[in-house]
């Protein structure tokens, strides 16, 4: 029995979820009493393998092929490696890439598959906790037989740390070029800008409480004074005031910053689904009954047009 995790990278950087998977994988491997293997496919695999070599990882496999994610290559390589290792548990990121190839791999291997896993408990059988319907419902999937594939949500496990002593080896595998039906020609950011809010440590997030587009200037001054990254709830994006890549939530991005400062955001379930993994949540809202206060660690019941200028000054900035 082996636990195998697959790393995720984009434009030359490993994504945080790759290291979180190592923690989830190590916990599962300990419960099962087996080894943890990790794999990285495409890009600068040697550098990536060095970075993935964290405490608790027993073996790292690399597959050299191109620079960026390719569905067919990943599906082929992950299937072949899982079979080669006889890995019982395959954990992949619940990311755009992971969601793309995980079902294909599960189908090729004839295995069960659960997406969006937020908990993995093993006690003779594996129980996978998943959230559904925008995090309104939590379900437990009991895996009663056979090997298993799960895509694991980012932000649910801490990143593995320390320097490990894993063996690193190139997986001896030839891509079947005839079965590669797509080629990545390049990238274009949707909605403009190159900010990835899912990687930010401190998000200042604005909601409909801001009222007018020109008032965004106020929040931008706070962002500048604090060195935070700006994100928003959906109405701000729907209004065209910020690009789509700034939207937090069920139909936006999932974020896991150290600090999430929600300003004029009510805390609708679809928004909370994207940010409840933040370490510290601070909310500013005029309505003491706003649902955001149910999950906030700190709350200010107040008008953002008073609170934000005071915060800007506190951080040494100048309100517009
Ligand atoms: P509102 O709910 O209107 O809240 C504004 C808040 O600002 C209120 O609580 C109010 O008290 C407060 N306020 C007003 N004036 C002030 C002031 N001067 N100072 C301080 N506070 C003030 N939403 C998302 O955010 N992300 C998603 O990904 C997403 N996906 C969705 C997917 C589906 C299928 C559906 C149906 C909905 C989705 N939504 C999403 C929309 C979601 O249901 C809410 O409508 C949205 O999150 C509300 O945004 P808001 O909190 O900014 O606005």
Image (cartoon, rainbow, N blue to C red):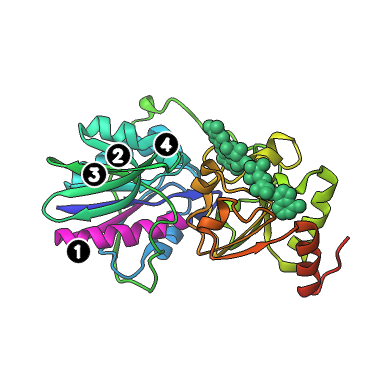
Q: Secondary structure at mark 2?
A: strand
* Image coordinates for residue 49, horizontal then vertical, percent: 39, 60
- Residue picked out by circle 1: 30
Mark 1 secondary-structure assignment: helix
Residue farthest to the right, as pictured: 320
* x then y, percent, for residue 284: 67, 59
Badge nearest the viewer, 3 or 1: 1
The C terminus, quarter of image: bottom right
Residue bearing the label numbered 4:
133
User: Which quarter of the rendered image does ligand 1 occupy?
Assistant: top right
Q: Is residue 213 above or below residue 164?
A: above
Tag on residue 82? 3
Between disc 1 and disc 2, the foreground one is 2
Q: For the residue carrying disc 3, how many other residues have a C-alpha within 10 Å: few (<14), some (14-19), or many (20+)?
A: some
Residue 20 lies within the magenta run: yes
Q: Residues within 10 Å of mark 4 (few under 14, many from 20)?
A: few
> In this rendering, would 270 be left or right of 210?
left
């Amino acid at each position: 029995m082996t636990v195998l995790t697959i790393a995720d990278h984009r434009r030359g950087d490993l994504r945080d979820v790759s290291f979180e998977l190592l923690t989830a994988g190590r916990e599962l491997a300990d419960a099962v009493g087996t080894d943890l293997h990790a794999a990285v496919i495409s890009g600068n695999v040697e550098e990536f393998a060095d970075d993935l070599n964290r405490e608790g990882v027993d073996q790292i496999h690399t597959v050299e092929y191109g620079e960026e994610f390719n569905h067919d290559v990943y599906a082929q390589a992950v299937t072949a490696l899982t079979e080669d290792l006889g890995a019982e548990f395959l954990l992949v990121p619940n990311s755009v890439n992971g969601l793309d190839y995980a079902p294909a791999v599960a189908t090729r291997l004839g295995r069960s598959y659960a997406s969006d896993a937020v908990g993995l408990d093993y006690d003779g059988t594996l129980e996978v906790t998943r959230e559904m319907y925008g995090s309104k419902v939590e379900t437990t999937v009991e895996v009663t037989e056979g090997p298993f594939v799960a895509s694991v949500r980012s932000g649910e496990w801490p990143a593995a740390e320390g320097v490990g002593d894993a063996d690193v080896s190139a997986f001896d595998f030839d891509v079947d070029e005839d079965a590669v039906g797509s080629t990545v020609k390049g990238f274009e950011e949707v909605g403009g800008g190159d900010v990835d809010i899912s990687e930010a440590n401190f998000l200042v997030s604005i909601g409909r409480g801001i009222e007018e587009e020109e008032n965004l200037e106020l929040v931008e001054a706070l962002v500048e004074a604090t060195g935070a990254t700006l994100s928003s709830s959906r109405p701000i994006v729907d209004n065209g005031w910020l690009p789509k890549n700034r939207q937090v939530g069920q139909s936006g991005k999932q974020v896991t910053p150290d600090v999430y400062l929600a300003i004029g955001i009510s805390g609708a379930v679809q928004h909370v689904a994207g940010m409840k993994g933040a370490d510290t949540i601070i909310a500013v809202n005029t309505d003491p009954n706003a649902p955001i206060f149910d999950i906030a660690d700190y709350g200010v019941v107040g008008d953002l047009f008073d609170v934000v200028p005071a915060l800007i000054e506190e951080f040494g900035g100048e309100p517009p």
